[in-house]
Amino acid sequence: MINVLNENYFIDLDEVERYLEMDGDFFIESGDTETKINLVKFELVKMLLDTVLTENDVMMDERLGMKMENKLSIPFKIAFNSLLNKKLINHY
């Protein structure tokens, strides 16, 4: 595991799937399989995860701990906090 902000985080794929599913009852004919998702949520979650997973961080000395937290970009912080708030990423 790699520490991110002094914690071990993971993407909860099951929670992402539940978050993207549309609420409501849908009639599905037998033999057909359909998954209905909210396209706006899908694109936003996709962009947020892309931002978090492709952050270009500066090489940090792990002994400095939280002092280096300010080196994270604003898009990373917003994406990370949004995903954490919706419980799409969790820590151990």
Image (cartoon, rainbow, N blue to C red):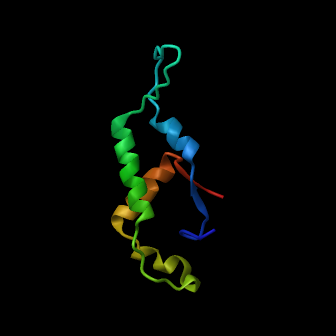
Based on the displayed image, in which of its 4 quarters is residue 54 positioned? bottom left
Q: State the quadrant of the C terminus.
A: bottom right
**Percent x, y for residue 17?**
51, 39
Residue in view at x 39 percent, y 49 percent: 46
Based on the displayed image, in which of its 4 quarters is residue 5 positioned? bottom right
Q: Nearer the viewer, residue 77 or 46?
A: 46
**Percent x, y for residue 36?**
43, 28
**Percent x, y for residue 8?**
61, 64
**Percent x, y for residue 50?**
39, 58
Residue in view at x 39 percent, y 41 percent: 42
Q: State the quadrant of the N terminus.
A: bottom right
Number of numbered discs visible in the structure rendering: 0
Q: Nearer the viewer, residue 48 or 31?
A: 31
Residue in view at x 49 percent, y 80 percent: 67
Q: Is residue 85 above or below residue 73?
A: above
Furthest residue toward right: 92
Q: Is residue 16 above or below residue 50?
A: above
Residue in view at x 58 percent, y 60 percent: 9
Left or right, 60 with reference to 91: left
